[in-house]
Image (cartoon, grey):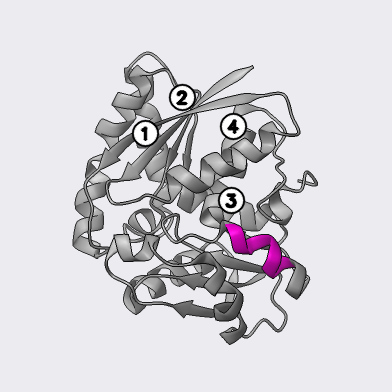
Amino acid sequence: MRYRIGQIVPSSNITMETEIPAIFRSRETILPERFTFHSSRMRMKKVTKEELEAMDAMSLKCAQELSDAHVDVMGYACLVAIMSMGKGYHCVSEVNLHQETVANDFPTPIVTSAGALINGLRVLGAKKVAVITPYMKPLTQMVVDYIEDQGFEVVDFIALEIADNLKVAAQNPMNLLEIYKQLNLEGVDVLVASACVQMPSLEAIDLIQAEIGIPVTSAAVCTTYEMMKKLGIEAKSNIGGALLSGKY
């Protein structure tokens, strides 16, 4: 069986189209399903509240374009754009995007990275979490508040304070092996190694998890997990930490 994966991508995001396919490609080595990847872009260069709001308004056009390609699932790739629009906004966004596909006569399941992260934490049974983001401190605080509004306690967080979205993508994921050590992980159930689908973390997730002995995840991993669930296939891969181990 071959599935079409649709991605709604900020124009300056180059990580979502590498990490999410990498997880699916790794899955292809152990399971029979095959995948192709199709993107539509919305303009955004600087990660500021103003640019994020303008970008979010373009997401509906992207949903129409991907719907024309009859993709089997659609992922909206900007976690902070959703979270900066107000608490619980992922539910609103998912309904709005789905309505576009219904209007285009091809109803398609929708995943937002914001909603997927929240769901992934629930699936992992998290109560207390620690979070790493690339965002400026005010946007990071919005993300923390959003996560806490969904019923989790954020014990500690790190904001790397990188405003330029291409500079976020240029971060070496292996640096996270040192960065995470600045966090207080006492009593933490899950570490979110990247709360941003633009900040690379995939190469580091399994390594950090082996070091700290608790589940480690990311927005990209949770988005991929949620896409697999929406497709009705086994949510499993060789990479991506506990969530994709096949236990969930």
Q: Which tag, 3 or 2, sits closer to the chain's start?
A: 2
Q: Which tag, 2 or 1, sits closer to the chain's start?
A: 1
Q: Main secondary structure of the magenta part?
A: helix
Around disc 4, counting alpha carbons within 10 Å, would you say few (fewer than 14), some (14 to 19), or many (20 or more)? some
Q: In x, y percent, where is residue 58?
A: 23, 40
Q: In x, y percent, where is residue 185?
A: 67, 81
Query: In the image, which is nearer the foreground, mark 3 or mark 2?
Result: 3
Q: Residue at x 60, y 59 (%)?
A: 203
Residue type for callout 1: Ser
Taking 41 as reference, is 18 left or right? right
- The residue wearing badge 1 is 39
- The residue wearing badge 4 is 230
Q: Which tag, 3 or 1, sits closer to the chain's start?
A: 1
Residue 211, by quadrant, is bottom right
Query: In the image, which is nearer the foreground, mark 1 or mark 4?
Result: 1
Residue at disc 1, secondary structure: strand
Q: CA distance from mark 1 to mark 4?
A: 18 Å
Q: Is residue 178 above or below residue 86?
A: below
Q: CA distance from mark 3 to mark 2?
A: 20 Å
Which stretch did the figure color magenta? 203-209
- Residue contact at pointers 3 and 1, CB within 8 angstroms: no
- Residue contact at pointers 2 and 4, CB within 8 angstroms: no
Residue type for callout 3: Val
Q: In x, y percent, where is residue 164?
A: 27, 66
Residue at disc 2, secondary structure: loop
Residue 64, by quadrant, is top left
- The residue wearing badge 3 is 221
Q: Which tag, 2 or 4, sits closer to the chain's start?
A: 2
Q: Which tag, 4 or 3, sits closer to the chain's start?
A: 3
- The residue wearing badge 2 is 108
Residue at disc 3, secondary structure: helix
